[in-house]
Amino acid sequence: MSEEERRDMEQEEREVLELVERYERMLSQNETSWFDSMEFLDIIDYYEEAEKEEQMKEALFRAYKLFPDDEEIIIRVTSYYISTGEYQKAERILKKALLKNESDELKGMLASCYVESDTHMRLAEKILTELVAKNSDFPYFNYLLGIVNLKKKKYKKAEELFRKVLNEFSDDESVLSNYVKCIADKTLVDTIISTLSGITDQDPYNDEAWLALAISYFEIREEEKSLECVNYAIAIDTEEETRHALKANIMIARREDDEYIKESLVASDYSDEKFTYYQAIGKVYLHQESYYSAIKYFKKAIEFEQFGISLPESNFGLLECCLMLGLEAEATALLDKVNALDYQAHYYIAFADRLHSLGFLALSKEIFENYLDSEDDYLAMTATISVAYIEAERDNLIDGIKLLKDYINKNEMGDNVYLAMLDLSCRDSRYINYSRFALRYIIKKKEFHKEIENNFPDLLKNNNYIKCLKELMNE
């Protein structure tokens, strides 16, 4: 920068500061003062750059009230509404403005409103197609039309549009992240990798492009290349969540748990949702059977969660750790807590399955029994079969079989219940009547033998099963 350019910049900054001071005196001391639309835009820009949200908002709407037909101010106001998710307000302002001035910029903002709100996508596509035809080199219109095509899963067209934008904005995070999504069409892999590699070749310090390339390689399961690229991105700018989160995912794919934990902790330092990383780390430690470490991070996840989410995985993880460590008092308190949180049923069913696999039969049965009379047929059937098998493992085979029979007497659906009854009753020749009952129903089904072969292969060698099958086939 030349000395003259530096002086001009300093002079411009002084003028903006004087403008803002005059504006603030007008507000605080009721001084009479006039600002034109360009001056208001300078004031708005100043507050936005200073991250003074309330002052920016007040200046913005004051400017709109004074200059409701100024196109740039309309664009700023509707951009604000779009950023806050108030799409209907933005749409009303833009439609009103377009009645007086059918500018391409206002049409583009209306299309942006539709794209962001995921409404009127056909109309958005029509508007943007016309705008791109008129302004083929205008990046924003190409970008928005690319988003429309991406949402419609027209990946080839989206890739072409995003690539065109990348010719000018090769370090734009939004364009790059959406461009990578086009890799969902595997026929575009080579084109996307080649494009991103070309960008990093031309600009080796483009960390956003390195990150996009790393994500692309990860999507096609080339972890080594992905790791190499994300390391370049981190070397250029380490203080960013996404690249450390990606590196953590690469590490877990490589089964390098310690490195996964290390990178997840770094990512958490830059995240507003630290609890997601702590919960994931807790699950890794749980898988490793490092129960005290798992407890530490599940508790941190619950402590740092600030969005009203009750974190079933952390709470159930804590409960499992306490059970495995024999901490009975803590486990009892946690069980009361998870019951009181009233999670969706599938969380309790999955946890009961987990307890069953770990050998906590009594507690597993207790949870399943809560769903025996569920109005959800699938839940009731799942719970019934699970309790029946637990009874069998606890040497109460006949109680399990009778539970299945009672279910069949009360319900029309239940092929799986008949199969479970056949499997359990064939374990003891004393209950062969139940075997006949179940098998008589099952053999009416097409390809029943294949189903048994796939799900209960041991039955094919079971003498009770073979005996019943021969009897019934000869009836």
Image (cartoon, helix red, strand yellow):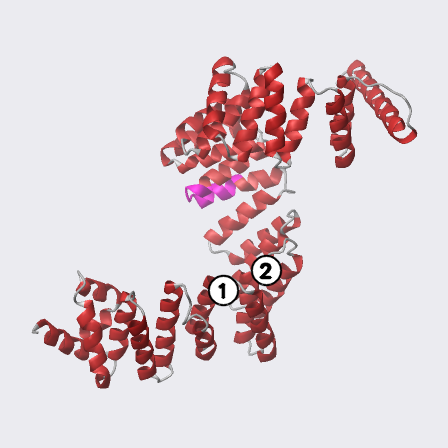
Picture quadrant of residue 14: top right
Residue linked to disc 1? 287
Which comes before the other along the chain, label 1 or label 2?
A: 1
Image position, residue 195 (x, y; %):
46, 28
Badge 2: residue crowd in 10 Å (few <14, some 14–19, many ≥20): some
Q: Tell me what residue is drawn at x 40 percent, y 63 percent.
A: 376
The dot on residue 310 is 2
Classify mark 2: helix, strand or loop. loop
Range of the magenta residues?
218-229
Query: Mark 1 against mark 2, which lies toward the viewer?
Result: 2
In this view, 359 is above or below 145: below
Picture quadrant of residue 51: top right
Image position, residue 345 (x, y; %):
47, 63
Image quadrant occupied by the N terminus? top right
Q: Nearer the viewer, residue 264 or 318?
A: 318
Image position, residue 47 (x, y; %):
77, 30
The amino acid type found where label 1 is placed reads His
Q: Tell me what residue is drawn at x 77 percent, y 36 percent.
A: 54
Real-space Cα distance between discs 1 and 2? 21 Å
Classify mark 1: helix, strand or loop. helix
Q: Is residue 228 magenta?
A: yes
